[in-house]
Image (cartoon, rainbow, N blue to C red):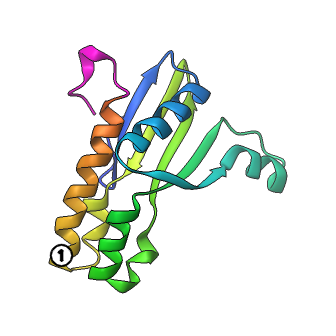
Amino acid sequence: MSDPAYGFTLRLPGVSYEDARQRIIDALAAEGFGILTEIDVAGTLKKKLGVDFRKYAILGACNPPLAHRALEAEPLIGLLLPCNVVVAEEDGGSVVALLSPKAIFQLVGNPRVEGLADEVEAKLRRALQSLAPAGSRGAS
């Protein structure tokens, strides 16, 4: 499966969901992001619908200085924040996916925000790529 137009992914064969979750949280912290929200999708689907679903979480990541700059440039950009990160269990491992700020912030049509999106996306991509095995650091 290739990356969606609105995000980028990294498959981690042999890496448990729990390990992948902690590794992306740590990698994001190294880039200045904290986790504001965490949605346990599997738990919610079980509770609300009685449906079994693989381990799947949506993390809301925020870099406060960058968020402040975005809000100063475009007051209602909060509709597009925080940066969503998916961690999901896959056959034989896990997948981590991040929303592309460049793709999403194009909706705003503000050049100041688009420049900031480049900076945010670079940080997110570095965090994600830091999880890749050494021999595959260039892959998405």
Among the 4 quarters of the image, the one containing residue 120: bottom left
Which residue is outermost to the bottom? Answer: 75
Residue at figure coordinates x 32%, y 55% from the top left: 100
Three-letter amino acid code at the position of disc 1: Arg
Q: Position of residue 102 (x, y in %)?
A: 25, 61
Q: Quadrant of the N terminus?
A: top left
Q: Quadrant of the C terminus?
A: top left
Numbered-mark total:
1
Among the 4 quarters of the image, the one containing residue 54: top right
Give the left or right position of residue 15, taking residue 115 as reference.
right
Using the image as rendered, state which of residue 104 and residue 61 is in the foreground.
Answer: 61
Few, some or many C-alpha atoms within 10 Å of disc 1 (few <14, some 14-19, many ≥20)? Answer: some
Q: Secondary structure at mark 1?
A: helix
Among the 4 quarters of the image, the one containing residue 71: bottom left
Residue at figure coordinates x 34%, y 39% from the top left: 127
Give the left or right position of residue 99, taking residue 85 as reference.
left
Q: Position of residue 50 (x, y in %)?
A: 84, 48
Report the magenta stretch's main SS. loop
Q: Position of residue 132 (x, y in %)?
A: 34, 24
In the depicted structure, whether residue 113 falls above or below residue 3: below
Residue at figure coordinates x 23%, y 48% from the top left: 122
Using the image as rendered, state which of residue 107 and residue 34 is in the foreground.
Answer: 34
Q: Is residue 39 magenta?
A: no
On the image, numbered disc 1 is attached to which residue? 112
The span picked out in magenta is 131-140
In the depicted structure, whether residue 45 falls above or below residue 135: below
Give the left or right position of residue 35, taking residue 8 as reference.
right
